[in-house]
Image (cartoon, rainbow, N blue to C red):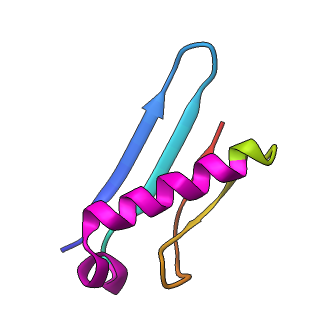
Amino acid sequence: MQTKFTIVMKGDFNMKIQFSTDNAAFEEYGIEYQIEVIFERIIQRIKNGETEGKIQDINGNNIGSWSL
């Protein structure tokens, strides 16, 4: 079953996070853990000055994107 998450936040800045959960990483590691890893990686990249990027699952597969 394919699930696509889209999160859009608006306020002082806009942020969009979009990714798909239809792969083995979500089954193997669990959806809660995989989402936690995704958010931690995005936070780190923002701290490093990035404003957009691809989202990879824990196995290294591209599953989506994010942007500020």
The residue shown at (39%, 46%) is 6
Above or below: residue 47 compared with residue 41? above
Residue 37 appears left or right of 1: right
Q: Characterize the magenta stretch by its predominant secondary structure.
A: helix
Foreground of the two, 64 or 26: 26
Residue positioned most to the left: 1
Which image quadrant: the C terminus?
top right
Q: Which residues are magenta?
A: 23-45
Which image quadrant: the N terminus?
bottom left
Residue 7, quarter of the rendered image? top left
Residue positioned most to the right: 49
Residue 37, image x, y percentages: 46, 62
Residue 26 appears left or right of 46: left
Q: Is residue 30 magenta?
A: yes
The residue shown at (50%, 46%) is 17
Above or below: residue 16 compared with residue 23? above
Q: Is residue 7 magenta?
A: no
How many numbered markers are drawn? 0
Residue 42, image x, y percentages: 60, 52
The residue shown at (73%, 43%) is 47
The residue shown at (59%, 26%) is 14
Residue 20 appears left or right of 47: left
Residue 32, quarter of the rendered image? bottom left
